[in-house]
Image (cartoon, coloured by chain):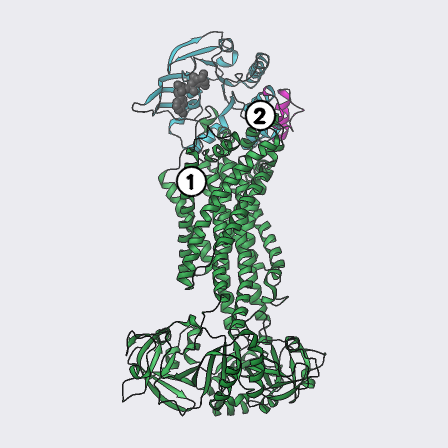
Chain colours: A cyan, B green
Amino acid sequence: MTTARPVLDLRGVTRTLPSGDSPLTILHAVDLVIQPGEFVAILGPSGSGKSTLLGIMAGLDRPSAGEVYLDGEPLHSLSEDALALVRRRKLGFVFQSFQLLPNLTAKENVLLPIELSGVRDPGARATALLAAVGLGARGHHYPVQLSGGEQQRVALARAFASEPPLLLADEPTGNLDSTNGTAVMTLLEELRARHGTTFVLVTHDPALAARAERQIHLRDGRVERDELRASRPGLRSA
Amino acid sequence: MTFGLLLRQIVRDLRGQGARLVFFLVCLGTGVGAVVAVAGFSRGLENGIRDRARQLLAADAAISSLRKLTPTLENTVAGLPKDVEVARTFELVTMITAGSSTAAAGEAMLVELKALEGRYPFYGTITLAPERPLTELLTKDTAVVAPEVLSRLGLRVGEDLAIGGERFRIAATIAAEPDRIGGTFTLGPRIFVTKEGLDRTSLESFGSRVVRKTLFKLPPAGTREDLERLVATLKAASNGVLEYRIETYAESQANLRDGIARVDKYLGLVALLSLLVGGVGIAQTVRAWLAGRLDSLAVLACLGFRPREVLALFLSETLLLALAGSLAGAAFGTAVLGVLPLFLGDLVPAGWVSAWQPAGVLRGVLLGLALAAVFSLPTLLAAGRVPPARVLRRDTEPLPLSRLSISVVLTLLFAGVFGTALVQARSALLALQFTLALLAVALLLAGVAALLLNGLARIPRERLSYRLRHPLAALAHPGSGTLGSIVALGIGVLVVLTLALVERSLSSQLRSDLPKDAPTLFLIDVQPDQWAGAEKELRAAGATRIDSVPVVMARLKALDGQPVEKLAEGAKENKQWTLTREQRLTYVDKLADDNEIVAGQALGAHGATAKTLFVKPDVAELSLERDFAKDLGAKVGSVLTFDVQGVPLDLTVTSIRAVNWKTFGINFFFVVEPGVLEDAPQTRLAAARVPPEREDALRSALARSFPNVTLVPVREVLEKIAALLGRLGGAVRFLGGFTVLAGVVILAGAVGATSSRRGREVALLKTIGLSRASVSGIFAAEYALVGLVAAGIAIVSAVTLSHAIAVEVFDLPPAGTAGPVLVAALSTVFVAVAAGLLASLGALRRRPIEALRSE
Ligand SMILES: Nc1ncnc2c1ncn2[C@@H]1O[C@H](COP(=O)(O)OP(=O)(O)OP(=O)(O)O)[C@@H](O)[C@H]1O
Ligand SMILES: [Mg+2]
């Protein structure tokens, strides 16, 4: 279909947890390939293993068995240090609980990944990103001084700050009311389109998932269904 | 991560940590302050002595001895180059009386007399009032006296006093004396006369103990080499006889310096203790700090910080804080040095110790940094292991430290404590003892506290009023940080209370009523032909239990043919002195009952008679005191050779005695078989019990009839020692107070660390309708419980420990403890409540909504 290297390539990823006598298996030999530019939603009921899978894709967690390649990097065999460097260069995150650093102002939160990647004039870029999420005037505020929706918008700006090829989001609207949720989601799609970012969205909300081109349904730690829905955007075929 | 980013991130991170930063700084600063104060004090005192070494000796070099110089030495001194100046001083303790024409005629007192010959002092000056030169005022008929002499005898300058029965006119009072250090123990105030004046009296010839010093001053151009050459010449002339102590100003005051080194050692450890107690606070603060930041740590990991970068970030932050805390502590310690003289009184001459002591500051700051690293590293290492997946699941706890890293951490902690103790004590053994003892105490405190908390947790709370239920629950709540506070506060209270109790039993022993039949005074230097008259005066003053023995002064020359100089070689200065000083020998028909024979003839006898003790017809026998025998290395059968004022005498040890010195009776190291010493030059030593109200009259009567006889009042001497001890003890307790301070800070820190929990608690309590006062009451009860538990454990341990020290180390009966214990308990509880409430003030004041929002 395409010769491009997949952004994510999961082969037989299994995750077990010790629990009592017999280990508990949360993921059962999941195989999954995600190509550059795709917008993938991972769906499933609570406890089906969505967050666990996302953690493994991000190298935040290690599979008990199987292999994970992120842009060609074998995450399953990298050291903690190497994983950190991969995240630094290739990944952006958005979480349900925002996860801004409370000691840092909004702007400093956005600045941090830019500084870490060694870009010149990080200040200008942070300002531009904050403006893009509509918070240009709130940069000096601390997270506690912002509303939930505002915090999540700062988190979006931070996620795109280092221009990562892959963006992972876990229930990004889960803590927001529907108006705010829709606004954040729209913003997220805009930014993703502008930056050409591959996007994996975890949600149990079918309405949100409907915005994606591809839906992967998880149940009890297995891929139940993997369906393509809309036409491919241009980026994919480029 | 670039260095710039690291720095920026540190600054951003520390911002808004206000209260926690302050706690960290205070925890560390308290201990560093104590270390700096002690190190600076001893260093300052040492410097003070070094800077004034010439003044303290009043010369460049000196020969000190109890005997007159040997003819060889005398010739050598006479043959020294003309430009080497020589002066002499003669010091003795004697009685003086107010002159017959004065209001207080005949009243007597004990003084330390110093007779001067030549241009004394070579360095420093004796300041007099009226302010005139000593040479002008002091003639063979005058004396200058310490002001105390005037006030005690009701005399004025210009009036007369009698020394050894001779009249001296008081020419001036002494305002300052160069070679007398305040706070050292003295039997009486100082009086100066000339040597000619002393010669008018016959004191010197009555066998009094006279300390003779020959002082030397090089010409102004004299070099270090000249001084060394002079000393070498003198040493050669002294023929290696140790009783002639020849020293330069640079090596003088050895005892004083030894004393300072010892004080530096032990007080240094007490100071270190407060630093270590502060370390508990540091560990707690860092732990609480990181606990509140686990989410942030996970986020940093998601953003691509490597574990070691996270460690570097937090370690740098900690060290930066540690540096700030240590510097603040150094400033604090320097300030303490500034006010320390207030606590020391005249123990240390004013102006000797300057507050700015760079060496002490350096030591404090380095120890502070080292301990901050040691105490925070375990927690920081755990921070590097926070799983980043925490951003996805809140309950993902940091990995428990592996067994390996736990043992690494424990080793580090042990090494840290031992290493810092080594720096302070400069003795591996002492440092090890300190470390092990501290470890044992901390474990004990923690163990008992854990048991108690566990017990408190089990108290059925349902039936209690919420006022008690809540504090109990708060204490029992796991992770409340209470255990650390209790251990820290407990160690502080334990240290101070133990110091106070030991000091108390020491001084109460000194002040306690002497044994019923103990003498209240001694008469020394009684000439044999004076004894009958002196005894009559004693009886006239209502004396009971009069006892007197002959005293023969002699010098130990050899043990079993080994010259005593050989034995003393390489021994500690103290022991050298024990062996080479002038010894007092006696002979009696019957030993006092407090003498028990522990080896040799008449084994096991208490108060043996000469008949049963000395049975060998062919040798002159000697009964030796046990401790002296041990020091000397003599056994039954050893032969001791004495020089009895020029006549050699061999004595064979046929028994060894244990003496109970606490009876204050007359006792001797050397008791010689009767029939050996009768013809030797001798004096008598007498002891008696005299009613206190008749002591002054007796003193005056004796001074009139026997001016050379010195009366030493036992009670007064013991009082003086107790007072000196009290002042030293005050200084030590002052330092020990730092450990309590550190403990209090830690309690406050632990309370402050849980302030967000506190805040939510307050918010909830207020929401259900409690007033701020009732919430404060509930909190106060909680902190009172913490204080009570800490005080309880500390008091039990301190009483046990101080009893052990009193009985085992000082051989004292334990003193009453009720007073200090009560004070300790009440003040601990008070301080705990005050610190706890103060630390919760923020939480109490905040509006409930703020606390709930920051959740
Ligand atoms: N650290 C853990 N310890 C114990 N169980 C875990 C852990 N992590 C995940 N699980 C279990 O694994 C299963 C999958 O968890 P996961 O968080 O991936 O579900 P999810 O699909 O994200 O659910 P939700 O929609 O509720 O967020 C759940 O049953 C969960 O309880
Ligand atoms: Mg989830």
The answer to whether mark 1 is within 8 Å of ligand 1 is no
Q: Which residues are magenta?
A: A119-148
Residue B660 to residue B172: above or below? above
The residue labelled by disc 2 is: B852
Q: Position of residue B356 (x, y in %)?
A: 61, 59
Q: Position of residue B572 (x, y in %)?
A: 42, 72
Among the two numbered marks 2 and 1 on one chain, the one whose residue lies closer to the N terminus: 1
The answer to whether mark 2 is within 8 Å of ligand 1 is no
Disc 2 crowd, CA 10 A, few/some/many (<14, 14-19, 20+): some
Q: Is-magenta flag for residue A142?
A: yes
Q: Gap between marks 2 and 1, in whole Å?
A: 33 Å
**B169 relative position to B48: left or right:** right
Q: Amino acid at mark 2?
A: Leu
Disc 1 crowd, CA 10 A, few/some/many (<14, 14-19, 20+): some
**Along the viewing direction, whichever of A85 and B378 lies nearer the viewer:** B378
The residue labelled by disc 1 is: B452
Dot 2: element: helix
Chain for numbered disc 1: B
Regarding residue B304, the answer to whether it shows in the image is no
